[in-house]
Image (spheres, rainbow, N blue to C red):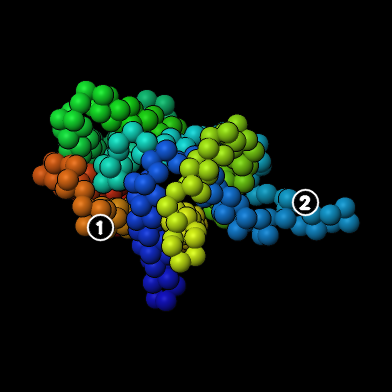
Amino acid sequence: MYDWLATLGLVFGGCCSNAVSLEQLTSDYPSAGSLITFFQFSIISLYGLPKHIIWTSYGPRLAPTRIPISRYLIQVALFYIISLLNNAAFAYQIPMSVHIIFRSGGLVVSMILGWSVARKKYNIHQVLSVLLVTLGVACTTLSASNSSSNDSNMGLNTYLTGICILSLALILSGFLGLVQDHTYSQYSGASAWKESMFYLHFLALPMFFLLRNDLATQFHLIHAGPKISSILIPTAYPALLLNTLTQLVCVSGVNRLTTRVNSLTVTLVLVVRKAVSLVLSVAMRQTTNNVDMRLLWAGAAMVLLGTIWYSLRGKKPKPKKE
């Protein structure tokens, strides 16, 4: 019981705190997505490094992996791009509430790719539940587009650009899921979630060199921002530190959850977690000023109900024993 409560504490405490700190950061610095992503990848890599190095007579080296490094490379590239896109979307007037629900639409992409690429078959409950999720994502998207269109056509175009960025991230996430399913099916004996979490972040660090100029610009912008008067530290520093640490807690909690319960329970827990994050976003940031709340809550309800429906009725019944 204690282990179960500790895992839930990591998921809800870490992920919900991460969403709150991310919203605070991106509200003040919407263009700091790359910097936030870099710090998140760095802290998770540093945390996992001691567990994945061994000391030899020639110095430290990476420990042997359960899954070959070559099988991680495509996953790393996809994960890197997806993470950057998700955080970059905030620069295009995407409210956190829309961001949370839109990313929940991954079920739609997973089904389409599963059917078209992996040749999977789905029952009527799965199809109908995904249609409900699709309708919910559409309502959520429209909930903020109305306010953008009222401001100006330029604002609407900016918002739609952000939606396109999130859509691309969703599609790539679907492909990442297929690659991971294929990899883990070949190495089913390797319970390597810690290894996977480490290498997905660690191997991506060199790619941030391509963004060094953007990272320097974003860091300078944050450093030059308002200061905490008593200690003269930029106000963004505590939020950036909190976001980085809670990202580590969140990722660890979710991966720990997957090793202790079945995929159905994982899905349901994460649905509830996103619902809590949505409530916190609306309550703490007063999203009502920029979003049609009726459409937002209607869309959120459809996404949550559709996901639960998919989880509960999507499994084929087990044959009864005589």
Left or right side of 86 for 94: left
Q: Residues within 10 Å of mark 2 (few under 14, many from 20)?
A: few
The residue shown at (31%, 42%) is: 99
Regarding residue 124, the answer to whether it shows in the image is: no
- Image height check: is 40 above or below 142? below
Q: Amino acid at mark 1?
A: Met
Instruction: Using the image as rendered, state which of residue 139 and residue 319 is in the foreground.
Output: 139
The answer for how far apart the CA atoms under marks 2 and 1 are is 46 Å
Q: Residues within 10 Å of mark 1 (few under 14, many from 20)?
A: few
Quarter where residue 156 is shown: top left
Q: Which numbered disc covers residue 218? A: none
Question: Mark 2 falls on what kind of element?
Answer: strand
Q: Amino acid at mark 2?
A: Arg
Left or right side of 10 for 304: left
Instruction: Using the image as rendered, state which of residue 133 and residue 310 is in the foreground.
Output: 133
- Image height check: is 22 above or below 177? below
Q: Locate the C terminus by quadrant.
A: bottom left
Say which of marks 2 and 1 sits in front: 1
- Image height check: is 282 above or below 161? below
Please state the horizontal and vertical placement of residue 118, each as a whole percent of the image.
Answer: 42, 30
Question: Mark 1 falls on what kind of element?
Answer: helix
Q: Locate the N terminus by quadrant.
A: bottom left
Left or right side of 223 for 28: left
Query: On the image, numbered disc 1 is attached to which residue?
Result: 284
Q: Please give the count of numbered marks on the rendered protein.
A: 2
Quarter where residue 89 is shown: top left
The residue shown at (36%, 47%) is: 28
Q: Which numbered disc covers residue 61? A: 2
The residue shown at (37%, 60%) is: 17
Please state the horizontal and vertical placement of residue 75, each as a whole percent of the image.
Answer: 54, 37
Q: Mark 1 or mark 2, which is nearer the start of the sequence?
A: 2
